[in-house]
Image (spheres, helix red, strand yellow):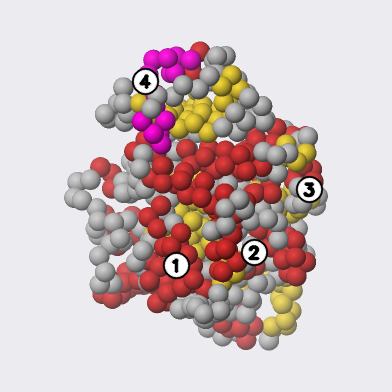
Amino acid sequence: MTPFEQTVYHFLSHLYGPRASEVQRRLGQHIEHFRHVSTAPPVTEITAGEEDHAPTWSEKDQWIISYGDSIVADDAPPLAVLNEFLQRYLGERISGVHVLPFFPWSSDDGFSVIHYREVNPELGNWEHIRELASHYDVMADLVLNHVSRESLWFVDYLTGSLPGRDYFIEVEPETDVSQVIRPRSSPLLVPISTRRGTRHVWATFSEDQIDLNFENPDVLLEFVGILLFYLQQGVRIIRLDAVAFLWKRLGTSCIHLPETHTVVRLLRAIVDEISPGTLLITETNVPHAENISYFGLERLANGAPDEAHMVYQFALPPLLLHTLTRGEATTLQSWLASLPVLPKQCTYLNFTASHDGIGVRPLEGLLPDHERDALLELMHRFGGFVSMRSNPDGSDTPYEINITWFEAMRGTRRGPDPWQIARFLCSQAIMLTLQGIPALYIHTLTGTLNDVEGVERSGRLRSINRRRWQRDELALLLESPSTPTHDVFHALSRLLEQRRSEPCFHPHAAQRVLPTPPELLAIERGPLSDGRRLLALFNVTDTLLPLDKVGEALERALSHHAWRALDQQNAVEDTALPPYAIRWMVTDA
């Protein structure tokens, strides 16, 4: 066996025991087919002998998150409208776009997939995806935990036909499933009428999203084939949706099981072997330590980490909310200082908002419950909602905040104030400063307000942050000075332009949080091999902040180097920072 084949066999043996050889043979057929039909070169070429095959990302990597129809027009398919918008208004300021599920679907705005290998005709077709991929790195969702009950696989299950007959998990209704960790408050077991009578199937997220049974190797092989098909269409980044819940074993929490990690490692080994430069990112909205376990850092002693290339920084959004609405950065500073130093094979995806709500679970162990509850109450005051989840003891606890990021920045604990845009931009600049790759949700980029009408129409709290812009309406706002959309978009565009030109923002550049008073956040990036370093200062309060009493470490950094503003060549001469001020400064010494 080749080293790759030995690695695959090791993973398959863990998953399927004595069936590993047969599963490997069939998996090899998928890979050989991919190699035969794939004529395009890898997205990112790996040079022979390159250190640890580290992904080739850089400070120029900045991504947008958008639904395929977040911007619509009457004269073109939504995917073409999105492509046109990105090229016209952002151009090379961004390098990638996460197009949220663009497949035929039945619920959850795309995450209940009916057909995995088709593009929703209401959005466009595969040619539109390939055209987008010719300009930007495209991220696509591999929704592998569950499938729509309208899918052909589930129709097979209902009729007892192959292949879907054995793709789902039946559980007797009296079975004790109280230990199972839930992200929702809906029943875990859903009664289904089949030709064999009523059966109860596992449904982690909703009665329309039926979990797949990965103990059946046919399911794994289906998704390997789907993943390879996406790569053939030009997709570079694969987002493993809800992957933490993938493997089930009664009597356990059914989250983060060892087999789940093995599946991620197997997919990583496959893409590294046949499509170097492809990135796997895990979507695990869970407490921080659980989240970063998908890097596989515990295996560093045995070589390079072999799990996800990237994980979302799920703790960042709620911690930023807490920091900027409370006016103190102590908790954020402590958390940032605790982040592990990552090897070059992996990095974080930093974000503040996405199509989902702002997760509350990542605050577990980081913020006391009374502080969390104060934040939730404030978001209620700003027009937001809170979604709940079920606990093993039958109680419900907060799961996520549903609100647009712009509305979440409306004020502080004292209520709304005039600093909304400044506070909002400060939050984005902090995110853009941090080690990793930043991703901006389309409705953060446009400063979108809460879509309460969308919630009323759909009955879903997440619709508050999923507005569909009319292209001409959005264009008018972007080109009309003094509108919040104009001011926010163009300010963020300037920050993106500055960031992509600064090598200290490379994902591998070191990061250090300087000890400062709670009102100030100070982050140093670098130094680089040539001595260049960047210092970022953020006033997280609504008051003027003098710089003469900022702590020894920052005073030493300010006095020992000749700092100049990143966006100009003149020296920085601030004696105080205005409310929510952002200062990016660089030095070559």
Query: Label 4 amino acid?
Result: Ala
Within the magenta stretch, is there residue 563?
Answer: yes
The secondary element bearing badge 2 is classed as loop
Lower position in the chain sequence, tag 4 or tag 3: 3
Q: Is residue 39 left or right of residue 76?
A: left
Instruction: Indicate which label's residue lies in the foreground, 4 or 1.
Output: 4
The answer to which of 487 and 38 lies nearer the viewer is 487
Quarter of the figure with residue 332: top right
| Residue denoted by label 3 | 380
Q: Is residue 454 left or right of residue 50?
A: right
On residue 83, the disc is 1
Q: Residue at x 24, y 53 (%)?
A: 46
Residue 44 visible (yes or no)? yes
Alpha-carbon span between mark 1 and mark 2: 18 Å
The secondary element bearing badge 4 is classed as loop
Furthest residue in direction left, as rendered: 48
Q: Residue at x 41, y 42 (%)?
A: 498
Query: Label 1 amino acid?
Result: Asn
In the rendered image, which quarter contains the C terminus?
top left
Instruction: Indicate which label's residue lies in the foreground, 1 or 3.
Output: 1
Instruction: Indicate which label's residue lies in the foreground, 4 or 2.
Output: 4
Query: Label 3 amino acid?
Result: His
| Residue denoted by label 4 | 562
Alpha-carbon span between mark 1 and mark 3: 35 Å
